[in-house]
Image: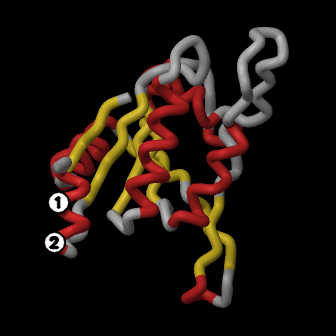
Amino acid sequence: MSDQEASQTSGVIKKFLYVNRRAPHGSNYAQEGLEVALIGAAFEQDVAMAYIDDGVFQLKTDQDTSEIGTKNFSPTYRALGDYDVKKIYVERESLEKRGLTQDDLMPLVYEDEDDDWEEKPMINLVTAAELQDIIEQSDVVLNF
């Protein structure tokens, strides 16, 4: 039995952090990481996602995969809020090294029912040191 299955069976909610380090295309890591995070959230675990290194490209807006012949799965990120995945951390240094800013990322939001269904941003820019603290506070860390 996996850790996730064990925690679901016992009723314990664990903090899962999915760390995404790879570019969105050229391998299955990015799409599989997103799918596994959605599955974890469907089992009512506390799911957070982190994007570092080339993983920051996964959240880039206006992705077009027509010239590389692969499916563009980036619209799936909009479903994260529906699964109560509201904590998305993007390492500021990784963005800067790649010449990107938060304005280059998808405008991912969730509706906060406690605040009259107001839309709130899900993406949080964090430093490498802040991300290290988030990793240390997580019960389970999965790398993609």
Task: In the displayed orientation, state which residue is furthest to the right.
Answer: 66
Residue 22, placed above or below residue 82: above
Q: Are marks 1 and 2 in contact (CB under 8 Å)?
A: yes
Would residue 106 appear left or right of 57 to someone viewing this image? right
Mark 1 residue element: helix
Residue 77, placed above or below residue 23: below
Give percent across and percent down for residue 77: 62, 47
Q: Give the number of the disc on residue 125.
A: none
Q: Quadrant of the C terminus?
A: top left
Rendering quarter of residue 44? bottom left
Would residue 133 appear left or right of 59 to someone viewing this image? left
Q: Give the number of the disc on residue 6.
A: 1
Counting the numbered discs, the total is 2
Pick the front one: 35 or 103? 35
Q: Amino acid at mark 1?
A: Ala
Pick the front one: 130 or 58? 58
Give me the residue at 46% from left, 21% from top.
22
Pick the front one: 69 or 141? 69
Q: CA distance from mark 1 to mark 2?
A: 6 Å
Residue denoted by label 2 = 10
Give me the residue at 31% from left, 35% from top.
128
Give me the residue at 48% from left, 33% from top.
32
Give percent across and percent down for residue 1: 16, 50
Give percent across and percent down for residue 106: 69, 44
Q: Amino acid at mark 2?
A: Ser
Mark 2 residue element: helix
